[in-house]
């Protein structure tokens, strides 16, 4: 039997299998002939730092995890992501599973979110209801993105009542109910979804004490299952401005610090994507209550050595008298970072933003020794 005959018969056999088992035949085939198979699609988050560390955003149609401590901007990033997707796609619909019951519609609107395309979950009494809702929404084909905030916020039914309906006490042993519930949910979710819904799980952390000197380490809770089913895990760590050296301009005292401003380190804990590996990290900046684009572009560009806070070189595009596209290198001088932020031209910000993702990729490749292999490939 020729190779082509074998391929043709295999195609017929698999088409019949898909038809008999009600499966989508477009999700299989020889990869040389089906160019959509195995393609990882990124979704821009609208946050230049997140896009840089992830090589253009979170992963579409997959499970993504963002975790961190209290006030580390997990929910803020999720809302920014919804706003960015709505801005680019007028048909985009997101659903938020508000397990913490703290959703603020005024804050969401201030982010630019169109509330007519954002579904808010009902107020759940128990975790099982929340995850059943997630499966229902994800398998409906009517939602493009599903955000769970947070996966640990609700108690399992087994923590609340006994099988006979009697209320439990906090003294009762209910260890590992949430990890088991999450494991079951993710197995059901993976089995029932078609890979078109982007799932964002926001996760809390616990502080472990252990090792030499009682070293503290922040770990996400929820069990091992959430480590297996996701394609991307980002850890957020909030820093104070003072004493860290992590602010783009000098702050002499706490009184000089802008209100609601602090740096946040973003670290990749897991990534199944080209060019980005476990351990990669970047600093982003929560500035006066938001991840303001202009401030972050200038600050991250400074961190990457694209300017020194006083002199910024950029390329300006224009059309000559014959309609030909041209570019010229411009210089912008400032007294310091604050002055640069206040006066820098918009075209300089656009130029830096277009270069930051490439520049970050160049910087992490420079850090790898010639014989080093990325952590992903060593496993």
Image (tube, grey):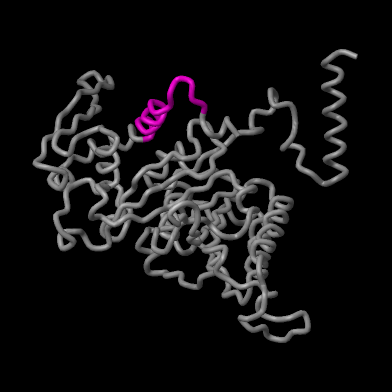
Instruction: Count how many numbered circles sit on residues in the image.
Output: 0
Please provide percent x and percent y for residue 316. Answer: 22, 29
* Direction from residue 79 to residue 28 in the image, left or right: right
176 or 340: nearer the eye? 176
| Residue 14 seen in the current view | yes
Residue occupying image coordinates x 50% and y 39%: 278
167 or 124: nearer the eye? 167
Q: Residue furthest right?
A: 1
Rendered image quadrant of residue 317: top left
Quarter of the image where the C terminus is located: top right
364 in magenta: yes
Judge whether 32 appears above or below 342 on screen.
Answer: above
Quarter of the image where the N terminus is located: top right
Is most of the magenta stretch helix, strand or loop? helix
271 or 293: nearer the eye? 271
Judge whether 36 appears above or below 342 on screen.
Answer: above
- The magenta stretch spans which residues? 357-373
Please provide percent x and percent y for residue 322. Answer: 23, 18
Q: Residue furthest bottom?
A: 166
Please provide percent x and percent y for residue 166. Answer: 72, 86
Residue occupying image coordinates x 27% and y 62%: 260
* Direction from residue 118 to residue 157 in the image, left or right: right
Residue occupying image coordinates x 60% and y 47%: 230
| Residue 295 seen in the current view | no
Q: Residue furthest top?
A: 2
* Direction from residue 237 to residue 247 in the image, left or right: left
Judge whether 32 appears above or below 185 on screen.
Answer: above
229 in magenta: no
Please provide percent x and percent y for residue 235. Answer: 46, 50
Residue occupying image coordinates x 31% and y 51%: 285
Q: Residue furthest left?
A: 335
């Amino acid at each position: 039997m020729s190779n082509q005959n074998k391929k043709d018969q295999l195609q017929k056999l698999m088409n019949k299998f898909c038809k008999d088992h009600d499966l989508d035949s477009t999700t299989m085939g020889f990869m040389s002939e089906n160019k959509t198979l195995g393609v990882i699609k990124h979704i821009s988050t609208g946050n230049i730092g997140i896009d840089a560390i992830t090589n253009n955003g979170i992963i579409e149609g997959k499970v993504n995890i963002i975790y961190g401590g209290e006030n580390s901007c997990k929910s803020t990033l999720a809302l920014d992501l919804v706003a960015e997707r709505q801005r680019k796609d007028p048909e985009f619909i997101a659903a938020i599973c508000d397990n913490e019951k703290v959703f603020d519609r005024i804050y969401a609107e201030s982010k630019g979110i169109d509330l007519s395309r954002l579904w808010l979950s009902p107020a759940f009494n128990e975790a099982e209801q929340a995850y059943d809702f997630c499966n229902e929404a994800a398998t409906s084909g009517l939602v493009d993105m599903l955000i769970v905030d947070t996966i640990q916020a609700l108690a399992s039914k087994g923590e609340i009542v006994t099988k006979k309906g009697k209320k439990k006490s906090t003294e009762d042993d209910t260890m590992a109910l949430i990890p088991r519930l999450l494991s079951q949910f993710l197995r059901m979710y993976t089995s029932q979804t078609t890979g078109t819904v982007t799932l964002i799980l926001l996760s809390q952390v616990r502080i472990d004490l252990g090792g030499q000197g009682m070293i503290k380490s922040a770990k996400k809770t929820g069990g091992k299952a959430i480590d297996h089913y996701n394609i991307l895990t980002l850890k957020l760590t909030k820093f104070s401005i003072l004493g860290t050296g992590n602010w783009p301009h000098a702050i002499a005292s706490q009184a000089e610090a802008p209100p609601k401003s602090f740096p946040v380190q973003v670290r990749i804990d897991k990534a199944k994507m080209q060019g980005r590996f476990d351990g990669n990290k970047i600093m982003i900046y929560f500035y006066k209550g938001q991840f303001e684009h202009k401030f972050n572009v200038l600050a991250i560009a400074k961190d990457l050595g694209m300017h020194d806070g006083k002199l910024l070189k950029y390329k300006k595009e224009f059309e000559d008298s014959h309609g030909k596209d041209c570019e010229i290198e411009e210089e912008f001088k400032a007294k310091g970072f604050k002055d640069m932020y206040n006066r820098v031209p918009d075209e300089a910000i656009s130029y830096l933003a277009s270069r930051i993702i490439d520049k970050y990729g160049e910087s992490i490749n420079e850090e790898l020794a010639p014989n080093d292999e990325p952590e992903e490939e060593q496993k």
